[in-house]
Image (cartoon, coloured by chain):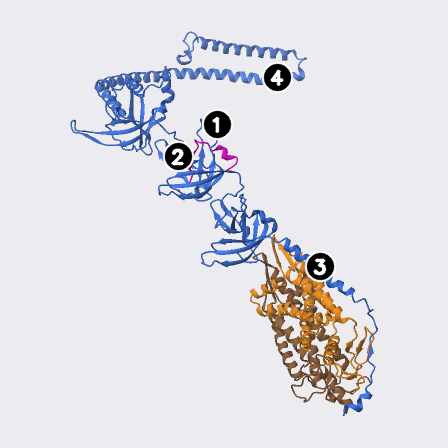
Chain colours: A blue, B brown, C orange
Amino acid sequence: MTDSPQLPDIQEVPDAVVERRRHRSSQLIWIIPIIAAIIGISLAVKSYMERGPVITITFKSGEGLESGKTKIKYKDVQIGEVKSIAIAKDRSHVVVTAELSKEAEGLLVEDTKFWVVRARISGGGISGLSTLMGGSYIGVDAGTSSEQKDKFNGLERPPVVTMDAPGRQFVLHTKDIGSLDIASPLYYRRMQVGEVVAYELDKDGNGVTLKIFVRAPYDQLVKANTMFWHASGIDITFDSNGVKVNTESMASILLGGISFQSPEDRVDAPPAGANSTFTLFSNKEEAMKRPDTVVETYLLVFTESVRGLPIGAPVDLRGVTVGEVSKINVELDTHRKKFSMPVEIQFYPERLRARYLKKAPQGKAIGSRELLSALVEHGFRAQLRSGNLLTGQLYVALDFFPKALPAKIDWSKSLPEFPTIAGSMEQFQTTLMQIVQKFEKMPLEELAVDARQTIQNLDITLKSADKLLKNVDAAIVPEARSMLVDVRKSLEDLRKTLDEARKTMGEAKQTLSSEAPLQLDLRDTLREMGRAAQSLRLLGDYLERNPEALIRGKKEDER
Amino acid sequence: MRRTGVSAGGLGLCSCQACGLVSRPEDSIGSARCPRCDARIHIRKPDSVRRCWALLIAAYILYLPANLLTIMETGSLISYRKDTIMSGVVHLWKSGSWAIAAIVFIASIMVPLFKLIALTILLVSVQRRSTWWPTQRAKLYRMVELVGRWSMLDIYVVTILAALVQIRSLATVKAGGGAIAFGTVVVLTMFAAQEFDPRLIWDPLRKESDV
Amino acid sequence: MTIHPKPLIACRECDLLLREIPLLPGGTACCRCCGAALYRNSPDSLDRTLALVLAATVLFIIANVYPIMGIEIQGTRNATNLYGAVHALWDQEMRSISFLVFMTTILLPAIELSMMIYILLPIRLRLLPVGIPLILRILQSIKPWGMVEVFMLGVLVSLVKLTDSSSIIPGVALWSFGGLTLMLAAVASSFNPRDVWEHLEIGIGEEVFK
């Protein structure tokens, strides 16, 4: 119970385990921590050396960005990672802190751009679909400046052209932007060669300024006199020339687009410099119209209806448009109590250039006045013609009318009047009147009487002819019929004879050489045949000589 | 012969769990402290059996949801599967990684089961003061202590996979409710093993010899 | 002055009262009854343990700073270190599991290592740190809860699980964890608290004798 007496009893020998460990030098063990320390330090140093720059990027929202996960990629190669996302103090934007790898240091210059790559539908199409699978990332466009920077403002949408894309930018002015947007395509001969990069309302609000980018080598095609026009959507025009449907591409129908072309005759002009300014026209026609520097206004007075003549209708000289209608009025001539329609036209004498110059033997352009006066003398007039029967549109045609009434251009008036001639509708009417008049002049009644008489005579003649035919029919036909019967009989005899002959031939084949009487018979038969043939021949001869015998019959004596 | 001997508790002596010093506690209730290391000393762990039972029963209760609930949800482009521990093992086996399937099976199914059963045996035998194979029971207890921590394996696997495989819609791994239950089971069994006082195995023998 | 012939010791497992005997270096004393190990004689245990603990600490830091491994699926990469994994689990609303993993693989091993350094380093430098008993008690209670080696196995299992669906990029921490596992096992086997208690007693004795 007490401990003391029992203690001496409890001398025990505990089991000692076999000695395994040798007493090693205690100093060797320190190698282990030293090695560990070396490894640790070298790793730390390595990671410190390899540490890349830390930058901040501001975005409007942190959509699609996750701290610690979102990567930063340049040309699809990962160069960094987002470390943290914080809301700015004034709560207007989001500040993203990102750590980049060491190699990316060179990219961090003044005009480097950052944007969030997400699935996006924009002017150029759908982009960034891979982010639906792998998550958004931040894209980088390296700038070319040499100023280092570590605080960036992120873009809200990817830049339309990357910094290093070769090409040139140009500036376009237009009245309204139509259906264009950033990344709307730019076409040359229906090939996409560039995009709209940016647009902005003019400061005075009178138009829109667009910045476009044309990729190399197509930027060489843009010359100083290149015309740009809206190629958006579908252009359908219904005018005196017919119906026209014009479109550039499906994309441009949806997204709008711009087309450009240089005028055909000056292909070798030098390319335009970067950032040159051009005007953006509404459509191709307007763009390709050569600016007419000389414009002359004339007055055409028409007395017929000008319904269907639109403003802007072409003034056409045998197919070449040399002007257009600019104003249409109506005037009441109180003196003569008539309405007249004065139509103002713009006339571009330059379009007559080829002929124009030909008439100038001195090499100097003759004044259009002399030319026009000369033409008018020869019957050059203006006339309203129907351009499109479908729509009833009219246009003004200039042409020579030899039968025109003589007229002169009065150059003294401020708005000279160009002589006109009635339109083709009216001419048609007058011609019709003339025909009708001619018709009226004809002695129709007398003609009718004569005709009646002639018909009666004809009737009689016909009746007698009819009688004749009947006689013929009665007289000749039986004769002919009997003759024919005779002929037939002879022919039948002939056939019979031939049959017999064939039989005989057959027998004769077997007994040919021997039987003389057979031969005699044969000869007789042949003689008969000859006679029959002869009579036939005679008949034929007779008929040949007297073919009317077939109708009239043989004369009694000759039968 | 080997089994006889006096236990320290039988003599009223107490060995400190922390420093091993054998000392005589002033009063056998509660707040005796070791003279050398000032740790609380007890002749036997207080309420050892009761506490151990409580923890063990809680572990038993949670063992069911641990195995029935999903422990890991794996999502990929083509499939989305929810795995319990068992189905995960089966999946591993079927996909050819036999070794890994065996390891996970041992660690996540056999070991917890072993712990639960072993502790139950120990507790029952101690409560009934049986003298049945004490050495083996002591060895059993040692095994339970050794092996206990390895059932955390599956939890760590789920942690790593859930942290790494986070690629939006391509592949995702998420821990499921079964992981919480299983983690709790592991912790509970570890606590239960800690609470169990192995000296109680030997006490019936000592008492016999004492008498 | 009572001469204690041989100090008493009670077996941890079976509570048998025994007398201690002197051991040769490297020897282990075991219980007569149940065979449990009682105490060891490991020479230079403190120095050795300190060296191993320092190495383990370095490896532990490396293992926590660097990513364990990364996977790559379809060009997207993802890598994580240990704390990142814990954090990921926390974000997934698995708070309790996250806490558990954090405790058993980061916090408790860290406490263990730092406490060991706290004790062993001064001793090496012939100083006596304060609060040894408390710290040794804490060390002993923490011991079963540091599960770095289980975590290591877990990493390997995940590695094998992932190799057939994506490409794996092993990280620095992977190797570091392997080394840490070995180190911690070595520490566990070489650490002998008895030597610490002896130092304490010597120190106290010295103080007394001063």
Q: Which comes before the other along the chain, label 1 or label 2?
A: 2
Q: Which comes before the other along the chain, label 3 or label 4?
A: 3
Q: Which residue is mark 1?
A: A268
**Where is residue C109 shown, x and y percent of the image?**
66, 69
Residue A219 within the segment the image draws in magenta = yes
Q: Is residue C122 placed above or below A431 in the rendered structure?
A: below
Which numbered marker is on residue A244? 2
Separation of marks 1 and 2 at Cα, in angstroms: 31 Å
Amino acid carrying label 1: it is Asp
Looking at the rendered image, the quarter that the N terminus of chain C falls into is: bottom right
Give the foreground label among 3 and 2: 3
Amino acid carrying label 4: it is Thr
Q: Which comes before the other along the chain, label 1 or label 3?
A: 3
Separation of marks 1 and 4 at Cα, in angstroms: 105 Å
Residue C31 seen in render:
yes
Q: Which residue is mark 3?
A: A38
